[in-house]
Image (tube, grey):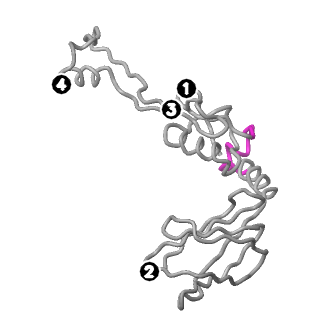
Amino acid sequence: MTSARCYSTTDFFAAGFQDHGIGLILGVDSNTGAGGANVWTHALLCRLFAASDSPPSPFQTLPNEAGMSVAIRRSLRVGPRAGTEVEDLGVTPDIFYRMTRDDLLNENVDLIEAAAEILATMPVYVLAAKVASNAGGQLTLDLETRNLDRLDVFVDGRPHYSQEIAEGKSRISFAARFDAGSTLDLQCYRKGQLAAARRLTL
């Protein structure tokens, strides 16, 4: 859920959430606060030029001790909106919500209900996993999955094993020799899209 008061870091979080298709954004305003850059003041720029060996500073003292700031290192979106700036534009919600009187007087009760209704229409994914055994060159995993159809296994960041999986509880084994402390990343897919992931330490 976003509003025009979501600014800077919350701009980045909402943009990443939307760009990577993690979920839907429910917004009470047409876009977020649109702060996607570093803010540098005129005074800071003057100090930076004065402390460097570059040509004379192009900045002059402003009259009446006035100050100003500018946006430096503006951030860009990725995915379907690649190249779009966060600064000045913000993040447009996928679903617009108009606040109600009850929201204002009763801690966003209608807004929370609207978000719950959206969540209720979305698929639920389950990926529970634990190491059953790791001996004799075989690693055995106990899995419980829901709405997932493929498992990929990575060991210390390197691809190691992949297979189709059925819904429910299952036990899988594959040849492996891992050291204590190795990380096991499980990535599960639904119709070719990454839907759930877990990391285990051996």
Q: Measured along the vertical axis of the image, is residue 73 above or below residue 78?
A: above
**Lower sequence index among marks 2 and 4:** 4
Identify the amino acid type marked 1: Asp
Mark 4 or 3: in front is: 4
Identify the amino acid type marked 2: Asp
User: Dot 3 lies on which element?
Assistant: loop
Residue pointed to by mark 1 = 88
Point out the stretch of residues depicted in magenta. Answer: 95-109
| Front one among 38 and 5 | 38
Residue pointed to by mark 2 = 179
**Residue at left 77%, top 49%?**
114
Q: Measured along the vertical axis of the image, is residue 67 above or below residue 74?
A: above
Q: CA distance from mark 1 to mark 4?
A: 31 Å
Q: CA distance from mark 2 to mark 4?
A: 52 Å
The numbered mark at residue 51 is 4
Would you call the spot at circle 1 few (<14 residues within 10 Å), some (14-19), or many (20 or more)? some
| Front one among 90 and 199 | 199
**Lower sequence index among marks 1 and 2:** 1
Residue 58, x across and y down, in percent: 27, 11
The single residue placed furthest to the bottom in the displayed view is 136
Residue pointed to by mark 3 = 35
Q: Quadrant of residue 164?
A: bottom right
Q: Is residue 67 magenta?
A: no
